[in-house]
Amino acid sequence: MTAMQRKARTLTHGQRLLLRRFTDRAAAWIRAGRRDDLDGIAAVLGCVLRLAVLLAGAAGAVWLIRRWPAVLWLAVPLWCWAAIRALDKDEDEEAPQKETEAPEATADQREQLLTLVRALIGDHPGVHLSTLLDHLRQHGQGEGWTIALLRTRLPLLGVPVRKSVKVARRVAYGVHRDDLPQPSPAEAQQDAA
């Protein structure tokens, strides 16, 4: 592979990361429009409105580029620069940091975490890390954590993480039921009672 091919592959990988981040942020922003205090169609009108805003923005960008193609002379270098920066951020998230290392977990803490994960899995094949992180945040834990941080901490606590766990037709990082260790005898007795 030549140096030019390596650079092109690097740029392609950065663009994939950038697109994934944009789509994740857009999807999260659309999901945030849902109202829990309402029922039926009224509850999702905020999501529909946010989706319409994003589609109007995309249509406006297409119109702008078709009207003035010279805009691409500015847009393409900015896009490539952002793609290269996305690679740097991805490497930063993957690199273990001193502050992200989990403290020594006691056996009791580990069992509590495993019990929580088993409860969240329920009768599904697994649980996504985003669901686990949302649950932790709702209960006052995990403030400031990210999915990447959770992905590095769980194995340190003895909870294996898979890259692709399918739950409700969605595939993402998560904990699969088959990877969990068997419950302790004390926990098995509590479940039986």
Image (cartoon, rainbow, N blue to C red):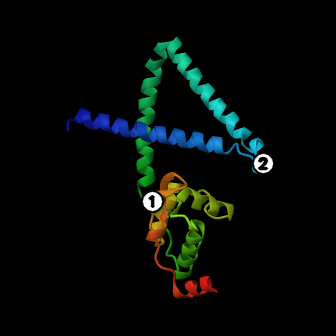
Residue 145 spot, x, y in % from top left: 57, 58
| Residue lying farthest to the left in this orientation | 1
At a point 55% along the width and 17% down the height, the residue shown is 64
At a point 31% along the width and 34% down the height, the residue shown is 8
Work out whether mark 1 precedes mark 2 in sequence or the reverse, and give the earlier one. Answer: 2
How would you rate the neighbour count of disc 2 (Cα within 10 Å): few for under 14, some for 14-19, many for 20 or more? few
Give the CA separation, mark 1 to mark 2: 44 Å
Residue 55 spot, x, y in % from top left: 60, 29
Residue 186 spot, x, y in % from top left: 56, 87
At a point 25% along the width and 32% down the height, the residue shown is 4
Residue type highlighted by circle 2? Asp
In the rendered image of this protein, does residue 125 appear above or below residue 40?
below
Residue 49 spot, x, y in % from top left: 70, 34
For label 1, the residue is: 97
Position of the C terminus, as image quadrant, is bottom right
For numbered disc 1, what is the local secondary structure?
loop
Q: Dots 1 and 2: beta carbons under 8 Å?
A: no
In the rendered image of this protein, does residue 104 appear above or below residue 133?
below
